[in-house]
Image (cartoon, rainbow, N blue to C red):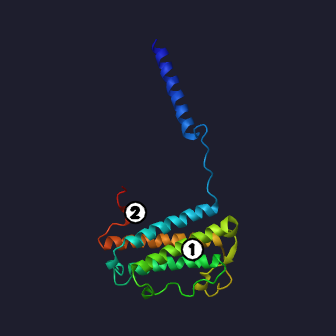
Amino acid sequence: MMKTRLFAVVIFAASASVTLAHTQETPKRGVALKPAPSASEGLLANWNEIGRKLIAMAEDFPDDKYDFKPAPTVGTFSKKLIHAAAANYFFTNVALGQKPPAEEDPKRDEFKNKAGVVAYVKKSFADGAAAIKAKGDKGLSASVLDPFAQDNPSQAGKSQIRLGDLATGLVEHSGEVYGQLTVYYRAAGLVPPESRPKK
């Protein structure tokens, strides 16, 4: 009798683990798996996500602290945002067949107020997203002159890069600026939007 119970328990446990594994690996009947995003769709999602975070900071940071800097040797909060937005045009301009920006960053006094900076940040990410959509997978795999090769005079006008890789590099750059701006928040005694409890 004891052997029968033990056998039943072992069979039940094995059956339960097979059922659990099956439900974890197999979607419910009638539910189609969503296909993996294409390369351009994945890039667009990453571009828009870091854009969302920087735009949230641009809109959230107090107006009277927009020219705050946590140390005398670094740029202000607004200059960091302007820098991130301006850098996006090294991708967008190239994607549209235009020359990269002549100067990396517009001057702070070109923006009358916080609203002007916010609008510029929003536009830079919207313009980049539109370029990614317009190019698609095929266009983003094309080779273009690397606009950053000018930093190395021996490579100026010679070095090429895939357009999608150029955009990916600028997503990474925006992520670095985002990380820097979280420090500005903390130094100003504020909590960054992404670190606040979700409602």
Q: How crowded is mark 1: few (under 14 residues within 10 Å), some or many (20 or more)?
A: some
Residue 54, horizontal then vertical, whole percent: 45, 70
> Taking 107 as reference, is 94 above or below it?
above
| Direction from residue 126 to residue 181 in the image, left or right | left
Picture disc at residue 127: 1
The residue closer to the viewer here, 5 or 109, is 109
Q: Residues within 10 Å of mark 2 (few under 14, many from 20)?
A: few
| Direction from residue 120 to residue 149 in the image, left or right | right
Residue 45, horizontal then vertical, whole percent: 55, 62
Q: Please state which amino acid type lies under the numbered disc 2.
A: Glu
Residue 154, horizontal then vertical, whole percent: 64, 87
Which circle, 2 or 1, is nearer the viewer?
A: 1
Give the residue at x 55% y 32%: 18
Q: Please state which amino acid type lies under the numbered disc 1.
A: Asp
> Is residue 80 something one can see in this rendering?
no
Give the residue at x 54% y 39%: 24
**Residue on which the image places disc 2:** 194
Residue 79, horizontal then vertical, whole percent: 43, 81
Q: Which residue lies furthest to the top in this view?
A: 1
